[in-house]
């Protein structure tokens, strides 16, 4: 900046020449300089005030906008900032088809210790061992007096246990809030739900992750905050499930079986209304998987899905269905049943001598191995395999259970004519009861393939056609005759027109060589009502023995069939099926339909 001199020489000389006072020029220049300085200072002050005012206005504007945003949003709990990904503890509920709770969350607490904060570690260890008998007092004392600065004592405790620990008065014993998975119905539908446990754990929260069943299959969905807590709705009916499990448990004990399973499925959309496997477990206290022995002996083993069994004569319906649909036979076609049927070094026999000939219907009603084998020979190995593949008998079921993909049916690598014959009556091929239920539903519902599911469906597109509607109607009539006058006579339930097919298969030895002589898998695959099929029920018993007679009886007609009949009798009204009562002769009663 250029400064003006206070006493400019030219003006001083000019003033002296005129006789003026040169000091007046200096005073005038000082005054002007001060005025300039004052003006600049005022401008700086005004600029600073303007900037400060703008800053205040913007600050208050931001605060006001944030307050308006918070006022318009939903209230939520504040979150503590921390490094790393947070633990999302909230997990969606699981409900049945009517919205009743199958699995939910419960707020509880964990118990942990910080030994450096403890006043009396010895007393704390003694009191904790008294409250939790499974804890070792000496081990606790060693941990409390060692170098550890933190240790878990209990991952979850009850309110009563929390109060008891609180009364110890030890500042080094602390509680952490967390959610735990609760199954209010205990073991009910245990194999479907599977169970959950803790994944990542922190002091203030724990991650709940699925361990098995639908809990693991839908683990990501159940934990996804984007679902806003929407429950996962299953196709199960809680009341029907409880009834099926109650009857199946009583039947298993009555028939002295080591295990049992039952599947009740909608024949038209594949919804599984009930699925039971015994023995079972409580998912609130899920046991550890076995590390040795037969996996099927564990209560965790889901016999309905994971159990691969030779299902015996229940397979005879497949051979007859295919032959009828191909036009090779009709229900009245006579089949040669003279026995034994010799094929090379193999001999195929029937359980009883049924005479030289049986109609196709009676081959199924009386369960003739020879008759079914001769029908299968007419079909041929290639077409037989194509039909079984179309029914889903060569692949794992796509049901929404994490255990399902590992249950792929066991079938022969080679398929000579003798295999074609034995497979036709369920020998030499192993599938799960769920495979059987889905296949029967596909045959009796009009002939379209169904896909089993554990999810509630509002609408299902028909699957590919397996057989014609005419063939399906013929099969329903045949299955009804099996119950009315055949091997499943104990399966008749008045008012509900039950049809079905029995199957009794010898259990293979664990060595893989040969079959046990006194151990069987007894199965009854049923449909009701046969006049208008709504549901398919498959009941299978592992090593049953009926002992009410002089000799033990193990066939499905004496073991699995009565259990299935009682399940139908108890569940049909729960499913909304009204009995159709036939008029009594000469009683003057007229049946009235709405």
Image (tube, helix red, strand yellow):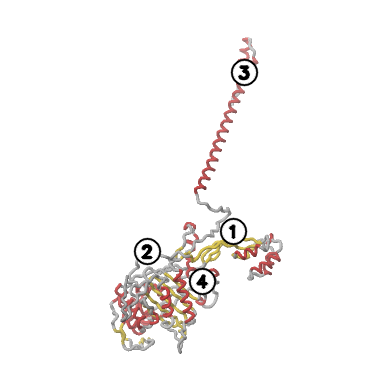
Q: CA distance from mark 3 to mark 2?
A: 101 Å
Residue named by callout 4: 187
Side (left or right) of 62 relative to 574: right
Mark 4 or 3: the one toward you: 4
Asked if residue 490 lies left or right of residue 113, the reply is left
Q: Earlier in the sequence, mark 2 or mark 4?
A: 4
Per the model, the C-alpha gap separating discs 3 and 1 is: 79 Å
x and y, in percent, of residue 435 in the image: 41, 73
3 or 1: mark nearer the eye: 1
**N-term mark: 3 or 2:** 3
**Labels 2 and 1: the sequence-earlier one:** 1
Mark 3 — residue? 28
> Residue under circle 1?
204
Q: Nearer the viewer, residue 522 or 586?
A: 586
- Sequence-first tag of 1 and 4: 4
Q: Quadrant of residue 197?
A: bottom right
Is residue 389 at all visible to an observer of this figure?
no
The mark that comes first in sequence, 3 or 1, is 3
Which residue is depicted at the point 51% across and 43% down?
A: 65
Examine the rendered structure and indicate whether residue 476 appears above or below residue 53. below
Q: Position of residue 9 (x, y in %)?
A: 62, 16
Q: Which mark is residue 459?
A: 2
Crowd around label 2: few <14 · some 14–19 · many ≥20 (10 Å): few
Residue 56 falls in image quadrant: top right
Q: Are marks 2 and 1 in contact (CB under 8 Å)?
A: no
Q: Mark 2 to mark 1: distance in Å?
A: 43 Å
Q: Quadrant of the N terminus?
A: top right
**Mark pair 2, 4: CA separation:** 30 Å
């Amino acid at each position: 900046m250029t400064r003006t001199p206070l006493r400019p020489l030219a003006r001083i000389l000019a003033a002296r020449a005129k006789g003026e006072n040169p000091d007046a020029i200096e005073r005038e220049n000082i005054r002007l300089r001060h005025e300039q300085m004052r003006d600049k200072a005022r401008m700086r002050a005004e600029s600073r005030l303007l900037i400060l005012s703008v800053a205040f206005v913007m600050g208050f504007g931001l605060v006001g906008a944030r307050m308006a945003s918070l006022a318009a949003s939903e209230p939520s709990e504040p979150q503590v900032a921390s490094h790393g990904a947070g633990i999302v503890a909230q997990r969606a509920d699981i409900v049945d088809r009517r919205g009743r709770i199958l699995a939910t969350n419960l707020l509880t607490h964990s118990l942990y210790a910080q030994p450096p904060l403890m006043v009396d570690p010895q007393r704390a260890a003694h009191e904790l061992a008294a409250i939790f008998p499974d804890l070792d007092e000496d081990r606790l004392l060693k941990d409390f007096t060692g170098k550890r600065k933190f240790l878990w004592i209990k991952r979850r405790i009850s309110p009563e246990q929390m109060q008891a620990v609180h009364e110890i008065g030890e500042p080094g014993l602390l509680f952490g809030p967390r959610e735990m998975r609760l199954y209010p119905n205990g073991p009910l539908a245990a194999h479907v739900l599977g169970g959950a446990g803790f994944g990542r754990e922190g002091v203030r929260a724990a991650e709940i992750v699925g361990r098995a069943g639908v809990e693991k299959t839908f683990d990501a969905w159940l934990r996804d905050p984007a679902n806003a807590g929407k429950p996962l709705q299953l196709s199960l009916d809680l009341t029907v499930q409880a009834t099926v499990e109650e009857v199946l448990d009583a039947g298993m004990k009555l028939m002295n079986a080591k295990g049992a399973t039952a599947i009740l499925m909608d024949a038209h959309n594949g919804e599984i209304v009930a699925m039971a496997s015994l023995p079972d477990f409580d998912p609130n206290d899920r046991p550890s998987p076995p590390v040795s022995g037969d996996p099927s002996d564990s209560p965790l083993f889901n016999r309905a899905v994971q159990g691969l069994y030779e299902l015996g004569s229940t397979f005879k319906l497949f051979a007859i269905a295919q032959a009828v649909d191909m036009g090779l036979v009709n229900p009245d076609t006579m089949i040669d049943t003279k026995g034994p049927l010799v094929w090379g070094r193999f001999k195929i026999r029937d359980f009883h001598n049924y005479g030289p000939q049986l109609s196709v219907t009676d081959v199924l009603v009386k369960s003739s191995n020879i008759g079914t084998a001769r029908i299968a020979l007419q079909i041929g190995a290639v077409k037989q395999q194509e039909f079984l593949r179309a029914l889903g008998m060569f692949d794992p079921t796509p049901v929404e259970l994490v255990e399902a993909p590992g249950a792929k049916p066991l079938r022969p690598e080679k398929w000579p004519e003798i295999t074609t014959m034995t497979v036709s009556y369920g020998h030499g091929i192993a599938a799960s009861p769920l495979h059987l239920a889905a296949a029967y539903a596909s045959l009796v519902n009009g002939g379209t393939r169904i896909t089993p599911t554990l999810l509630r469906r509002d609408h299902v597109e028909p699957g590919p056609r397996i057989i014609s509607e005419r063939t399906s109607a013929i099969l329903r009539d045949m299955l009804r005759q099996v119950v009315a006058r055949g091997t499943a006579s104990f399966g008749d339930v008045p008012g509900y027109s039950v049809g079905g097919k029995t199957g009794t298969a010898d259990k293979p030895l664990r060595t893989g060589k040969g079959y046990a002589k006194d151990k069987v898998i007894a199965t009854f695959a049923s449909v009701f009502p046969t006049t208008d099929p709504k549901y398919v029920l498959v009941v299978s018993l592992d090593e049953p023995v009926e002992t009410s007679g002089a000799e033990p009886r193990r066939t499905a007609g004496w073991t699995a069939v009565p259990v299935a009949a009682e399940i139908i009798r108890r569940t049909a009204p729960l499913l909304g099926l009204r009995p159709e009562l036939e008029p009594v002769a000469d009683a003057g009663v007229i049946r009235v339909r709405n």
